[in-house]
Amino acid sequence: SLSLVFLSFALFFLSLSVSLSSFSLSLSLSLLSLSLSLSLSLCLCLCFSLSLSLSFSLLSLSSLSFSLFSLSSFFLSLFSLLSLYLSPFFLFSLFSLYYRLPLPMEGAPLEEDFDAFVTVLRESPNLSLRRDVSRPLPALLFSCQVGVGRTNLAMILGTLVLNHLKTTQEPPQVEEAEAKPLFQVIQTLINRLPEGQQVMEEVDQAIALCSEMHNIKEAMYENKKKLEAIGDDFQIQGSTTKDYFLHRAIQSLERYFYLIVFNAYLHEQYSLAFASNFSQWLCAHPWVYRLLACMDLSELSAPPDLVTKGARVLVAHEYLSPDILSTVKEMKVANFRRVPKMPVYGMSQPTSEATGAVLTHLTDEKRKYSHVLWVNLQEELVLEGNGQIFTPREPSCMGQHIPVPATDPTQIEKLETALGEEVQRAQKWLEVTLEQEKQMKMFKSCLTVQEVFKQYQRTHPGLFYKRIPLADCCAPKEEDFDQLLEAMKSTLAEDSHSAFVFNCSNGKGRTTTAMVIAALTVWHFNGFPEFGDDEIVSVPDAKYTKGEFKVVMQLVRLLPDGHQMKREVDMALDSVSETMTPMHYHLREIIICTYRQFHSWPVDGSNAPVFIWLQFHSWPIDGCSSTPGP
């Protein structure tokens, strides 16, 4: 009897210890509740021992029957315990792992989501390259709410992982789909990635294997097809049809883009046991972010008849670019200015008449410039109609420019030519927005900027025209610096006494940036002027007004002779800003003023535009502390 009691205790505590050592908390609690139910076995065993004592001492029939009942109950409890430990429920806890990995319903996962998935790979010995190759690969099971979108994405990720673990690569049994042209951003991506073509083909095979319910790649082309087939625009789910399908197309393209990037990450990091997580690896490849930022290339295929059909309107230059410096009366162009004592000029977009006035000013007896480099910095379409400058805009947001993400300025010029031809061919009254009103105009003449300068190059053989599109409200790309420097070097090699003219839409942001670059370049060719002593500034947050942001000072410490480099840039900024005081535009002051404005606004939807603007200027803000100051 005592041995049966001890056996019951042993069975109970064995089940309790196994349940507490389970891999999953939820599984542990389930086993614990089952083990507690086995306490009935202990009670029955105790009753069984007592009944045996009574039966042998009293030899009563009732006690004997009770002892038989207790004995049968004991064996029933023992059978239940064995069934528990041999059931799939118990075996699952020994041979499986459970993770929760939230993924977005649409678009690509966040970098943190990829990092969480990489953590799963790190913590799973069966998914390591050092695993026992004699054992079969583990099964990967994914689920979401309906088992389609997010599950499909996770299955593709799992397929890519297992492909890296297979010792022998078997050709996948998938039907070959019709080859379709690659999106430009995908073509650029695989050109930049090591073995990019192979990386993309592996992703395509994984997508095809997991495409029974949903094909990510086909969704891209389907959304693109729907976007291009839109005729009359109408509202759908709170936005226009065009915006809706454009958003869907970009989301599906972004998801495919990230799958290719993640597979490239696996190729590099799997053999290194994931020494860097995905987000760290991406930070070491910053060009990937720039490709993502230029993913929307829909403007390259926008038809020119959007203007003649009324889907877009032509907005006059006077409406978009007020003449803050009051130079239209004298120079025929808004915000015309010069860097003091330097052959560097800036202005807004000039008309044909204004272009002639500026060239006459530069080549007169006082200045006598025989060579002029004129750089147009606009990335949006520009058209001169009836002697006025116009640019196409969306009717709902005429103050927001429509950039054309062209890799070659000739793409923009071809679109401008097509727009001009369409406007002249239509010969209809078009609604245009002027400085203070809307009017209906019929254009008798249309000229592109390139056509205007070709006309003046006949009378000014020393005029060189370049179009180097710069993105608004952000830093130029490295290629932009290269193009500006190369254009200036060629001009200075031709004539060291050359003039440099820059223009954008309003003569402010991009023009100022290019003028600073030009000033530094000219100083490097002709020698830097003497620097005066640093001015003592006694204003609140003076060090930030002087550009001493944390990230800037970190860069200064890293660069050879960094303090001198910063001093030269500050001098160029001050020289360029000296003649544009009424515009209240100085890069160092813009940074701190916008930062203060952002922190003084309430945290709600109303500060979204400022927040977006800050993202464009995030290079100085990243080094700012959040409480005492920037």
Image: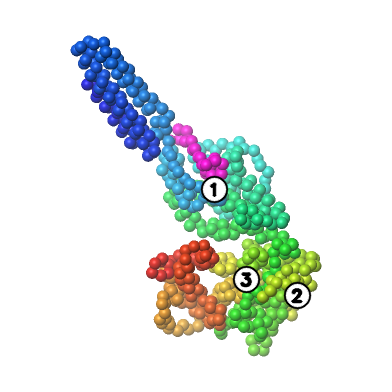
Residue 555 shows in the view: no
- Tell us which disc is closer to us: 2 or 1: 1
Q: Which residue in the structure is indicated by mark 1?
A: 105
Residue 423 place in picture, x, y as percent: 76, 67
| Left or right: 99 as drawn, with respect to 251 | left
Residue visible at 52% across and 43% down in the picture: 154
Is 131 one of the magenta-colored residues?
A: yes
**Quadrant position of the C terminus in the picture:** bottom left
Task: Give the structural element (helix, strand or loop) at label 3.
Answer: loop
Residue 388, x across and y down, in percent: 71, 75
| Marks 2/3: CA–CA distance | 23 Å
Frontmost of labels 1 and 3 is 1
Image vertical order of residue 267 relative to residue 66, above or below: below
Q: Residue at x 44, y 42 (%)?
A: 99
At label 2, the amino acid type is Asn
The residue closer to the viewer here, 229 or 153, is 229
On screen, residue 596 versus residue 55, left or right, reads: right
Whole-percent x and y of residue 624? 43, 67
What span is in magenta?
130-158
Asked whether the viewer can see residue 133, the reply is yes
Question: Would you name the residue on which mark 3 appears?
Answer: 377
- Which callout, 2 or 3, points to the residue nearer the camera? 2
Type of amino acid under label 1: Met
User: Was residue 517 drawn as part of the magenta stretch in this picture?
Assistant: no
First along the sequence among labels 2 and 3: 3
Whole-Å distance between the Cαs marked 1 and 3? 39 Å
Whether residue 190 sits left or right of residue 590 in the image: it is: right
- SS for tag 2? loop
Mark 1 crowd level (few <14, some 14–19, many ≥20, 10 Å Cα): some
